[in-house]
């Protein structure tokens, strides 16, 4: 019995050590041989320039997208939440520390909707709105104001609703491209393309399915935009006539909008 116990102990140690050793070998083999591109669309194996080209091509083919985030334009920071198609767009735009309004464009028809405070502040810059201004603004509260194509505001506002125009500006980067780290955007695996080591912008491209751009940090701290719902259809229709005010009509406190 005395001789048996040491023998059993030695056998036990060998079994345990053997099992541990086998487990370690299996684990190390799995880690060492794991393909980071397994289960992906394969763009992670491409050069930075090729990844960006694939992402841009995918974006150009898409007929719908949702853009959320911030943009710096002409010294002002805007927060966007826009859904866009090739025939129009709908969503909300707000200026940091300032106004907030909704935009809706269906083909060439552009509508703007805001509250009374927004309209009351549209008078002379730096001047407090008068009581008459506030009464007139109250008539526009929550209404869709139709902006005529000939008005300077049309070109400025419609840019927020044009798929090609907005994407061209959002996806712009400048400088030598390099591939960056892999990560995730809203749970989707991505690979980063950095321009000028990030100073010229950074684009996170999907490694799953179509290689859409999912997030972009613009050069010069000019905003961060997330892109989602690529190709996803949504309802886009002009508002009912009783919800629309003609921008060209004179709105006063005495005369209700037609």
Image (cartoon, rainbow, N blue to C red):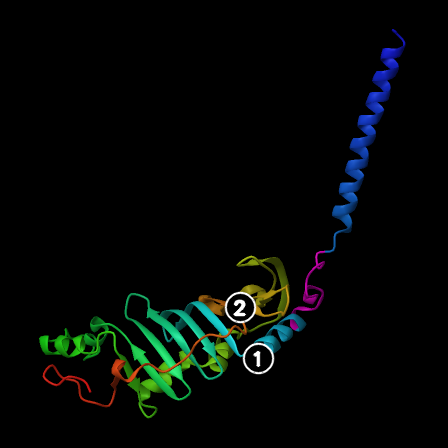
Quarter of the image holding residue 244? bottom left
Task: Please identify the residue farthest to the bottom as the structure is shown.
Answer: 150
Indicate the secondary structure of the residue bearing disc 2: loop
Circle 1 Cα neighbour tier, 10 Å, few/some/many (<14 / 14–19 / ≥20): some
Q: Are marks 2 and 1 in contact (CB under 8 Å)?
A: no
Where is residue 78 drawn, in percent x and y?
Answer: 37, 70
Viewer-side residue, 115 vs 242: 242
Quarter of the image holding residue 94? bottom left
Asked if one can make out residue 76 in the rendered structure from this viewpoint, the answer is no
Left-right relation of 106 to 135 = right
Read off the residue under disc 1. Answer: 60
Left-right relation of 72 to 25 = left
Q: Quadrant of the C terminus?
A: bottom left
Quarter of the image holding residue 230? bottom right
Residue at coordinates 31% horizontally, 73% vertically from top-left?
101
Q: Which residues are magenta?
A: 36-49
Per the picture, the main secondary structure of the magenta-coloured stretch is loop
Question: Which of the labelled discs sits on residue 228, or is there none?
Answer: none
Residue at coordinates 61% horizontally, 71% vertically from top-left?
176
Read off the residue under disc 2. Answer: 201
Q: Earlier in the sequence, mark 2 or mark 1?
A: 1
Judge whether 42 appears above or below 21 on screen.
Answer: below
Viewer-side residue, 53 vs 34: 34
Where is residue 75 drawn, in percent x and y?
Answer: 36, 72
Where is residue 139 drawn, in percent x and y?
Answer: 18, 78
Residue at coordinates 31% horizontally, 86% vertically from top-left?
147
Where is residue 86 drawn, in percent x and y?
Answer: 49, 83
């Amino acid at each position: 019995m005395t001789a048996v116990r040491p023998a059993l102990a030695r056998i036990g140690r060998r079994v345990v050590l053997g099992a541990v050793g086998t487990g370690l070998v299996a684990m190390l083999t799995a880690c060492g041989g794991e393909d980071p591109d397994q289960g992906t669309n394969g763009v992670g194996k491409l050069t930075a320039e090729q990844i960006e080209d694939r992402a841009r091509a995918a974006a150009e083919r898409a007929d719908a997208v949702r853009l959320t985030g911030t943009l710096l334009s002409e010294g002002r920071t805007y927060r966007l939440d826009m859904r866009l198609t090739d025939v129009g767009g709908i969503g909300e735009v707000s200026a940091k520390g300032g106004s907030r309004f909704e935009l809706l464009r269906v083909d060439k028809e552009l509508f703007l909707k805001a509250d009374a405070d927004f309209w009351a502040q549209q008078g002379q810059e730096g001047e407090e709105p008068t009581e008459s201004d506030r009464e007139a603004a109250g008539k526009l509260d929550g209404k869709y104001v139709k902006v005529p194509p000939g008005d300077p505001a049309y070109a400025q506002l419609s840019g927020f609703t044009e798929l090609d125009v907005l994407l061209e500006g959002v996806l712009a980067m400048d400088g030598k491209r390099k591939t960056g780290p892999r990560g995730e955007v809203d749970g989707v695996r991505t690979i980063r393309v950095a321009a000028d080591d990030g100073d010229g912008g950074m684009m996170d491209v999907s490694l799953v399915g179509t290689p859409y751009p999912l997030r972009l940090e613009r050069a010069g701290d000019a905003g961060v935009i997330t892109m989602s719902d690529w190709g996803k259809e949504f309802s886009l229709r002009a508002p009912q006539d009783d919800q629309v005010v003609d921008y060209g009509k004179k709105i006063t406190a005495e005369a209700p909008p037609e």
